[in-house]
Image (cartoon, rainbow, N blue to C red):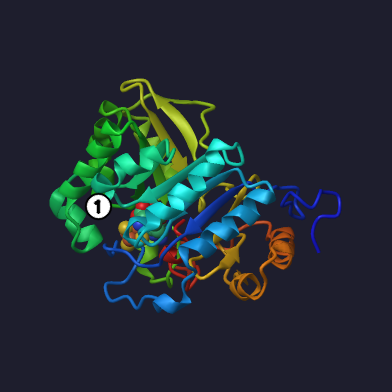
């Protein structure tokens, strides 16, 4: 069943939302092990279970045929997928012909320095780079072995290639709060937006999430003691709400899946690297598309599965982090990439 009031070429759900933004996870693998995202000893999917880059591209074209205008490559770490630039090249043709408004990626930045120029050549205009701290030791501790210098080199390369850069940081209680002013100044001095993300209980729900979880509504109030925040209408098509900081002139975004309504205007759908379609980050169970894709040269069966899955999109996520209780999902964040 899909929404009978909408034409077959759009992806509407029961709550009046339309999916126009696809987050495409190209791998579950990563060269880092951020503590809020993965355990240190990960078992990754066998390579044979992954869709090929050609299959990911074919699926992307089916989504485009149904009104998807923006595609963000994510992971795991998208830049560790071998030949991933060939997917960017294929998608870039759809920027040229107007099927897509934007192709972009979320990356940890560790391999960005060698890919930035090529990304720009493929029509990527901006990238999100995840960076939670400027302190090299703390960076290594959070990511378990990451080298911040590689990320800083990646940021330089991206800006030199003309890419807009937005930094993403997962907010956590403790040192993060102490270092946040430095991160804000760093981002804004370099002309980069900074977006803060509330920690979500994915990848199992260890009780320590209750201890580390920092509601951004509280953090914003404390920031207002030091900074002058004015709401701005800026949107990047994603869930962040932005503020201008008078002192720096830069923008600070807040992504608040846990403490504020995040779902009522959700335009996002997510595809795993094995071809499972998730219409909500906060629910288990995706709609498998891989077999239907492989069993037919035509796209109609897959298109029908996509339409049905989007129509059944839940009203909202089912996460909760309380003082003592956490309810989340066993699926790791790296399966879908946020
Ligand atoms: N590896 C890439 C990166 O780190 O940017 C892309 C995938 S990563 C899963 C996408 C985003 O999700 C990153 O900004 C990361 O910080 C964020 N993230 C990971 N685990 C999270 C969690 N439990 N809650 C909130 N955000 C999380
Ligand atoms: Fe890797 Fe990104 Fe998860 Fe960190 S947040 S472990 S960089 S996928």
Instruction: Name which residue lies at 38% across and 52% down.
Output: 85
From the image, which quarter does the N terminus lie in? bottom right
Instruction: Name which residue lies at 50% across and 57% down.
Output: 24
Toward the left, the furthest residue is 137
Tell me the quarter of the picture where residue 31 sits. bottom left
Residue 271 at what x, y percent from top left? Answer: 54, 61
Residue 57 at what x, y percent from top left? Answer: 53, 57
Residue 98 at what x, y percent from top left? Answer: 60, 36
Viewer-proximal residue among 290 and 134: 290
Toward the front, the furthest residue is 297
- Does residue 285 appear left or right of residue 228 in this picture? right
Viewer-proximal residue among 280 and 1: 1
Viewer-proximal residue among 243 and 60: 60
Tell me the quarter of the picture where residue 30 sits. bottom left
Q: How many marks are shown on the rendered structure?
A: 1
Residue behind label 1 places its C-beta within 8 angstroms of ligand 2: yes
Viewer-proximal residue among 11 and 168: 11
SS category of the residue bearing label 1: loop
- Can the viewer see residue 88? yes
- Does residue 158 appear left or right of residue 280 in this picture? left
- Does residue 298 appear left or right of residue 271 in this picture? right
> Where 103 falls versus 108 (above or below)?
above
How many neighbours does mark 1 have within 10 angstroms: few (below 14), some (14-19), or many (20 or more)? many
Ligand 2: which quarter?
Answer: bottom left
> Where 230 falls versus 17 (above or below)?
above
- Can the viewer see residue 212? no
> Where 133 falls versus 162 (above or below)?
below
Instruction: Name which residue lies at 57% across and 71% down.
Output: 284
Residue carrying label 1 = 110
């Amino acid at each position: 069943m899909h929404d009978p009031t909408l034409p077959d070429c759009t992806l509407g759900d029961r709550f009046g939302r339309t999916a126009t933004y696809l987050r495409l996870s190209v791998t579950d693998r990563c060269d880092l092990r951020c503590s809020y995202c993965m355990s240190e000893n990960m078992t990754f999917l066998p390579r044979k279970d992954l869709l090929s880059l050609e299959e990911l591209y074919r699926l992307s074209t089916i989504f485009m045929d149904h009104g998807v205008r923006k595609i963000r490559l994510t992971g795991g770490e998208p830049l560790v997928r071998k030949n991933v630039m060939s997917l960017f090249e294929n998608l870039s043709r759809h920027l040229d012909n107007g099927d897509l408004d934007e192709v972009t990626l979320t990356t940890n930045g560790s391999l960005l320095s060698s890919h930035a120029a090529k990304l720009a050549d493929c029509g990527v205009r901006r990238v999100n780079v995840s960076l939670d701290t400027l302190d090299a030791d703390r960076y290594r501790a959070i990511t378990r072995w990451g080298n911040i210098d590689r990320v800083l080199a990646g940021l330089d390369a991206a800006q030199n290639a003309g890419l807009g850069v937005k930094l993403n940081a997962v907010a956590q209680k403790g040192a993060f709060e102490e270092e946040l002013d430095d991160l804000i100044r760093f981002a804004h001095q370099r002309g980069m937006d900074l977006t803060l993300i509330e920690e979500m209980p994915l990848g199992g729900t260890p009780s320590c999430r209750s201890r580390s979880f920092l509601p951004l509504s509280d953090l914003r109030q404390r920031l207002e003691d030091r900074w002058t925040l004015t709401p701005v209408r800026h949107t990047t098509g994603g869930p962040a709400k932005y503020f201008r900081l008078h002192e720096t002139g830069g923008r600070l975004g807040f992504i608040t899946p846990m403490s504020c309504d995040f779902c009522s205007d959700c335009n996002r759908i997510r595809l795993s690297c094995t071809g499972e379609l998730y219409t909500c980050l906060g629910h288990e169970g995706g709609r498998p598309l891989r077999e239907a894709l492989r069993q037919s040269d035509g796209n109609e069966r897959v298109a029908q599965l996509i339409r049905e899955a989007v129509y059944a999109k839940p009203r909202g996520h089912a996460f909760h982090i309380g003082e003592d209780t956490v309810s989340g999902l066993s699926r790791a964040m790296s399966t879908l990439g946020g």
